[in-house]
Amino acid sequence: MIRERNRSLRDEDYIKETADYLKKNMDKGYSLESLKWALINQGKSRVVVDRAVDIINEEIKHQNEIKALQSKPSQTQIIQTLDEGPELPEQPKKKGFFSRIFG
């Protein structure tokens, strides 16, 4: 039982190292797909590589969600923009029907 738990921890560390390797090389400009197949062709387990790719995809998804939230204007920014909108020139007040006739 202890061996199985230690083995799974080592497997998780191995997957994490593989994911770190993928991130580092993606920063250099390599595509995730080309790195994935390079690792598989070098003899890495396909399961380990796929799990590392899943980790990378989750991190990318999380980063994109954060960027999307940061790019959305907040409600106070929208209100300020509406309050500071362009000022229109004042138009003369129109006379009512009776004031035009009697007035």
Image: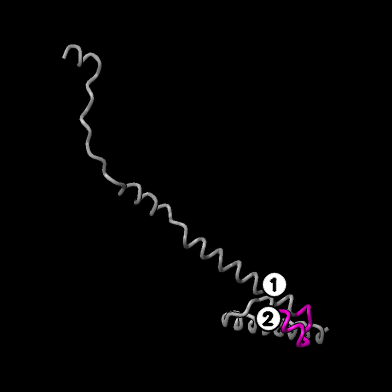
Q: Which residue is drawn at 65% across and 81% down?
A: 22
Residue 61 horizontal/vertical position (percent): 61, 66
Left or right of 68 on screen, residue 26: right
Q: How far apart are marks 1 and 2 (CA)?
A: 13 Å
- Prevailing SS of the magenta stretch: helix
Name the residue nearer the viewer: 76 or 52.
Answer: 52
As helix, strand or loop, the secondary structure at mark 2 comes to helix
Does the segment drawn in magenta span residue 13? no
Left or right of 11 on screen, residue 60: left
Residue 79 horizontal/vertical position (percent): 37, 49
Select label 1 or label 2 by which is in front: 2
Count of numbered tags: 2
Compared with 65, 50 (above or below) is below
Which residue position is annotated with label 2?
A: 35
Left or right of 99 on screen, residue 75: right
Q: How crowded is mark 1: few (under 14 residues within 10 Å), some or many (20 or more)?
A: few
Q: What residue type is labelled 1?
A: Asp
Q: What residue type is labelled 2?
A: Leu
Q: Which residue is drawn at 42% across and 52% down?
A: 75
**Quadrant of the rendering where the N terminus is positioned:** bottom right
Q: Residue at x 78, y 78 (%)?
A: 47
Would you identify the image quadrant in which residue 87 lies?
top left
Q: Residue at x 80, y 85 (%)?
A: 2
Does the segment drawn in magenta span residue 37? yes
Q: Which of marks 1 and 2 is nearer the N terminus?
A: 2
Which residue position is annotated with label 1?
A: 54
Residue sitting farthest toward the top: 102
Tell me where the magenta segment starts and ends, as one range.
36-48
Residue 33 horizontal/vertical position (percent): 69, 75
Would you identify the image quadrant in which residue 99 lies?
top left
Left or right of 44 on screen, residue 101: left
Compared with 91, 12 (above or below) is below
